[in-house]
Each structure stands twice: as structure tokens, then as C-alpha cells.
Image (cartoon, rainbow, N blue to C red):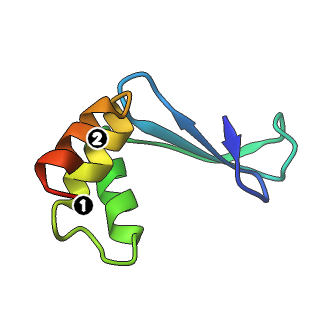
Amino acid sequence: MFHTKNGLYFNRNDDGSVTIIKNYNAIPDSRKIFEEIIDADTWASVIASMSKSGEGDNRFYIAKIFNESDNSGLLSFLNEQGV
């Protein structure tokens, strides 16, 4: 579980989805205020959309491959794109 700050935690699940948890404070066992599971495609879309250039130019697919692979797939994809 990755803690950003102020009780906001992220956990990557085995299927590529991400669980987001907001606790009352930064103490891991404090009262949970919010919990949501974001599916893998939506997570990739969030990551790509938050990049400076957005989802265009295959950035969604790059984020998806980055999230779901051991990154060898990402390197192959980038090589195919001439990056």
C-alpha cells in the first residue's frame, strides 16, 4: 500500500486495478472514510490524462502497457512507435 499523504493510500491489485483508500488520518489503521477500486483501463486513462500531453498519441496504451506488464511490453511498443 502506497501512502501519499493525509491518509490517502493506493494499492495496485494483481489484475492491474488500483484500490484507493482515504483514511481519517495518516495512521494506517485509522477509520476508513472512502474506498474505491478503479479498474485497470480506467487507471491507465487517469495516468495518461494527468500527463502533460493528455491521452493523445497512444498515451493511454503506453500507460496501460506500463501498468499491466513487466515493462518489456512497453519497451517493444515504444520501439514499434519509433520512440
Q: In the rendered image, which quarter contains the C terminus?
A: bottom left
Residue pictured at 83% horizontal, 53% vertical: 25
Under mark 1, the amino acid is Arg
Q: SS class of the residue under badge 1?
A: helix
Q: Tag on residue 75?
A: 2
- The earlier-in-sequence mark between 1 and 2 is 1
Residue pictured at 83% horizontal, 40% vertical: 30
Q: Which residue is mark 1?
A: 59
Question: Farthest residue in the right direction?
Answer: 27
Above-or-below relation of 68 to 48: above
> Foreground residue, 25 or 17?
17
Q: Residues within 10 Å of mark 1 (few under 14, many from 20)?
A: some
42 with respect to 57 (left or right): right
Q: Residues within 10 Å of mark 2 (few under 14, many from 20)?
A: some
State the separation of the CA atoms marked 1 and 2: 14 Å
Q: In the rendered image, which quarter contains the N terminus?
A: top right
> Foreground residue, 18 or 31?
18
Under mark 2, the amino acid is Leu
Q: SS class of the residue under badge 2?
A: helix
Residue pictured at 18% horizontal, 44% vertical: 77
Residue 36: x and y, percent?
48, 44
Q: Tag on residue 18?
A: none
